[in-house]
Amino acid sequence: MESGFPPPQIDTSRPHPARLYNYYLGGKDNYPVDREAAAVLLRTLPEAREIARQNRLFMQRVVRHLVTEAGVRQIIDIGTGIPAAGNVHEVAHEIVSFRDALAPGSYLALSHGTADFHVPGDVGLATTVYSKATAPLVVRDHQRVTAMFSGWDLIEPGVVQVPLWRPDRPASIPRDLAKIGIYGGVGRLGHQQRS
Ligand SMILES: C[S@@+](CC[C@H](N)C(=O)[O-])C[C@H]1O[C@@H](n2cnc3c(N)ncnc32)[C@H](O)[C@@H]1O
């Protein structure tokens, strides 16, 4: 049986974004250092749990759409959560920078944290917590997240707070939508964009 990562390969001296995310979702793959950092953040931003849950639901709706409606058969998942392989960021960089490597009809789906809906101090606290982690938290406004789709055709409804991206039912949109500070969107690569 696989025994997982040997402990020396896991840095438990600093919080890790994937383990923080796992903690918000109620998972078990986290350490005291993650739980302590998460507790600080959750005191100011208790909605972090709901943001994580909504982000996960967005990802699931997107994948379902791509596989069942758009006919996508290969998916590269960048920033999966708990890391399972090294150098993921290198793959991400290559894909985002070298769009020509992708076939026409490829899709880019991403979600991204934003401070557009929160008071700056609260988001500042969150970024401070992450500044002590193994990777920082970078928030971007709607214009900057939309700019990430430059060269892609955004499919409906464009870049929106994740619960608003093709909700399964109107009832699945949280009442306190203003607390869900994360945007999501899906773009499609057309033929003309590769030439
Ligand atoms: C908010 S979680 C999302 C997890 C999962 N994709 C989902 O939708 O449930 C973001 C993940 O991206 C990872 N991450 C952060 N910066 C990254 C980078 N530069 N390259 C690859 N992954 C990164 C974090 O470690 C974390 O696991």
Image (cartoon, rainbow, N blue to C red):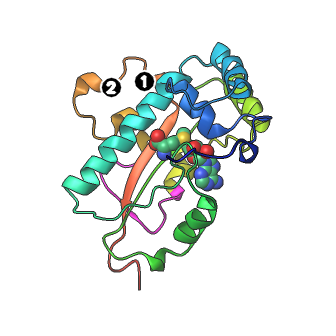
Q: The C terminus is located in which quarter? A: bottom left
Q: Nearer the viewer, residue 120 or 169?
A: 169
Q: For the point 58% across and 56% down, which residue is it?
A: 85
Q: Is residue 179 above or below residue 7?
A: above
Which numbered tag is attached to residue 190? none
- Left or right relative to 82: residue 16: right
Q: Is residue 153 magenta?
A: yes
Residue type beneath disc 1 = Leu
Q: Residue 59: horizontal and vertical position, in percent? A: 39, 43
Give residue 2's position: percent from left, percent from top: 52, 48
The residue that label 1 is drawn on is 177
Label 2: which secondary element: loop
Q: Which residues are magenta?
A: 147-158
Which residue is at a point 27% across and 35% down the rendered structure image?
167
Q: Residue at x 43, y 18 (%)?
A: 176
The crowding category of the residue bearing disc 2, from other C-alpha atoms within 10 Å (few below 14, some 14 to 19, many at least 20), is some
Q: Which mark is residue 173?
A: 2
Image location of residue 29, percent across then percent down: 57, 32
In the displayed structure, would residue 133 be above or below residue 174? below
Q: Could you tell me how far apart the alpha carbons at marks 2 and 1 are, in whole angstroms? A: 7 Å
Q: Does the CB distance between marks 2 and 1 fall below 8 Å?
A: yes
Which secondary structure is most common in the magenta stretch? Answer: loop
Disc 1: CA contacts within 10 A as few (<14), some (14-19) or many (>=20): some
Q: Nearer the viewer, residue 85 or 115?
A: 85
Image quadrant assignment for residue 131? top right
Relative to 39, does residue 181 appear above or below in the rendering? below
Three-letter amino acid code at the position of disc 2 = Ile
Horizontal relation, residue 31 to residue 161: left or right: right
Query: What secondary structure is found at the residue carrying circle 1?
Result: helix
